[in-house]
Image (cartoon, rainbow, N blue to C red):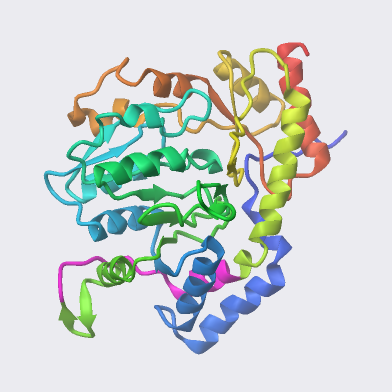
């Protein structure tokens, strides 16, 4: 009897480990042998390397992407009674962090073409806001030229949610070349969850900035507000990046650009093979913005049926995200209802993520393409 075809996973974190197994094992062994598991040279070394990668002066490692968002907001002075402008088409951590700070999310709708924050929605929305928190969704940076200009005019600081955008770039007016996500606002928050483009072996995150005062505040807040071993300048949290995760991330960072290039090639193949198929809307590629292709997300009015078709064919497609945050039970207290964010709600109903990771084999990608085309009779 023939062996059943192996499933095509949405992401394969084990394949990423295999690609650098010897280096990763050595890095972990080095930390264990030294016995220094919190802070120390591994964390400091990764922070320097990641700051250089993003094109900023400073990076502060923290325990998760959620912690990066939370502590970033606190470093900006966001607190009880404040409003933070953001979007509802994102993972819950974006809005959780705002509420952890005691603030209230002020939602604006997303752009029809990209699913990211629509600058047109910011007209009037920034009045009285304490911060604006745009999300570089699926790896594609938002229109930071427009959002940054509007925020600057309103005197509102920007915290980038760059959890999915490691290595993505934006060309801004007056710059000599493209700038990477993480260098486009006052602060940026990154997640190194295992499935991310730069993924740890557990939870991890970082805040990037060019502002020494903001970085110092995040460093203090991540470590129980300490200004000395037993001196606590303010209330803080236990949100430190541990040394094993830092060592893992430092190894994987050395191949991040090559891995992102592989993602771009795979995304290009999808777009070539699926152009004009059914009612599929393929990912937008706006001029002056380069995605890190964390996810390859299409839209179709037949999303749920296509998802089931893919799963029946052994393809683990996914949905990011099926219920927008303004309609989630956890945020019911914000008082929103259906129809409040129509473009956001359309994206939630129609988006489908196809398998994408650097080690995706051509034959496996062709299986995905064939299944999608078969569904539409193409």
Q: Nearer the viewer, residue 155 or 157?
A: 155
Residue 133 shows up from this direction: yes
Q: Residue at x 46, y 31 (%)?
A: 321
Name, please, the residue furthest toward the left: 81
Q: Quadrant of the C terminus?
A: top right
Q: Is residue 252 above or below residue 332?
A: below
Camera-nearest residue between 183 and 359: 183
Task: Kindly give the residue lying farthest to the right in the view shown.
Answer: 1
Q: Is residue 329 above or below residue 266?
A: above
Q: Nearer the viewer, residue 349 or 189?
A: 189
Residue 191: name its quadrant: bottom left
Left or right: 334, with 362 as reference point: left
Span of residues in magenta: 233-250
**Where does the N terminus fall, quadrant-wise?**
top right
Q: Is residue 188 left or right of residue 226?
A: right
Q: Is residue 264 magenta?
A: no
Q: Residue at x 66, y 20 (%)?
A: 309
* Residue at 42% in and 41% down: 135
Q: Is residue 200 visible?
A: no
Q: Quadrant of residue 73?
A: bottom left
When the figure is inspected, residue 86 is found, relative to residue 324, above or below; the finding is below
Q: Is residue 114 above or below residue 14?
A: above
Residue 128: give x, y in percent of width and height: 17, 39
Name which residue lies at 29% across and 48% down: 97
Left or right: 21 as drawn, with respect to 347: right
In the image, residue 377 lies at what x, y percent? 76, 11
Residue 77 location (% of width, % of height): 20, 56
Residue 238 shown in magenta:
yes
């Amino acid at each position: 009897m023939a062996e059943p075809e192996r499933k095509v996973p949405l992401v394969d974190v084990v394949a990423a480990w295999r690609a650098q197994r010897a280096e990763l094992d050595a890095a972990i062994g080095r930390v264990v042998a030294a016995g220094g598991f919190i802070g120390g040279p591994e964390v400091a070394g990764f922070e320097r390397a990641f700051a250089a990668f993003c094109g900023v002066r400073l990076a502060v490692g923290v325990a998760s992407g959620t912690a990066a968002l939370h502590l970033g907001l606190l470093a900006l002075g966001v607190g009880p009674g404040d409003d933070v402008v953001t979007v509802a088409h994102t993972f819950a951590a974006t809005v959780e962090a705002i509420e952890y700070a005691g603030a209230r999310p002020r939602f604006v709708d997303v752009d029809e073409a990209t699913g990211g924050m629509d600058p047109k929605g910011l007209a009037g929305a920034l009045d009285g806001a304490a911060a604006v928190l745009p999300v570089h969704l699926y790896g594609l940076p938002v229109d930071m030229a427009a959002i940054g200009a509007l925020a600057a005019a309103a005197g509102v600081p920007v915290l980038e949610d760059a959890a999915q955008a490691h290595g993505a770039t934006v060309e801004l007016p007056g710059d000599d070349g493209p700038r990477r996500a993480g260098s486009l606002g006052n602060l940026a928050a990154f997640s190194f969850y295992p499935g991310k483009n730069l993924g740890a072996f557990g939870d991890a995150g970082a805040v990037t900035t060019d502002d020494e005062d903001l970085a110092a505040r995040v460093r203090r807040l991540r470590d129980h507000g300490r200004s000395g071993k037993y001196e606590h300048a303010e209330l803080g949290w236990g949100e430190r990046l541990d040394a094993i995760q830092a060592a893992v991330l430092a190894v994987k960072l050395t191949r991040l650009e090559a891995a992102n290039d592989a993602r771009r090639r795979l995304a290009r193949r999808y777009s070539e093979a699926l152009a004009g198929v059914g009612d599929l809307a393929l990912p937008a590629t706006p001029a002056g913005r380069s995605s890190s292709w964390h996810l390859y997300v299409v839209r179709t009015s037949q999303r749920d049926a296509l998802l089931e078709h893919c799963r029946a064919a052994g393809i683990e497609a996914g949905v990011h995200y099926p219920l927008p945050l303004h309609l989630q039970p956890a945020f019911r207290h914000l008082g929103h209802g259906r129809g409040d964010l129509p473009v956001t709600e359309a994206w939630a109903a129609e988006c489908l993520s196809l398998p994408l990771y650097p080690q995706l084999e051509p034959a496996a990608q062709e299986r995905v393409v064939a299944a999608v085309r078969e569904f539409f009779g193409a």
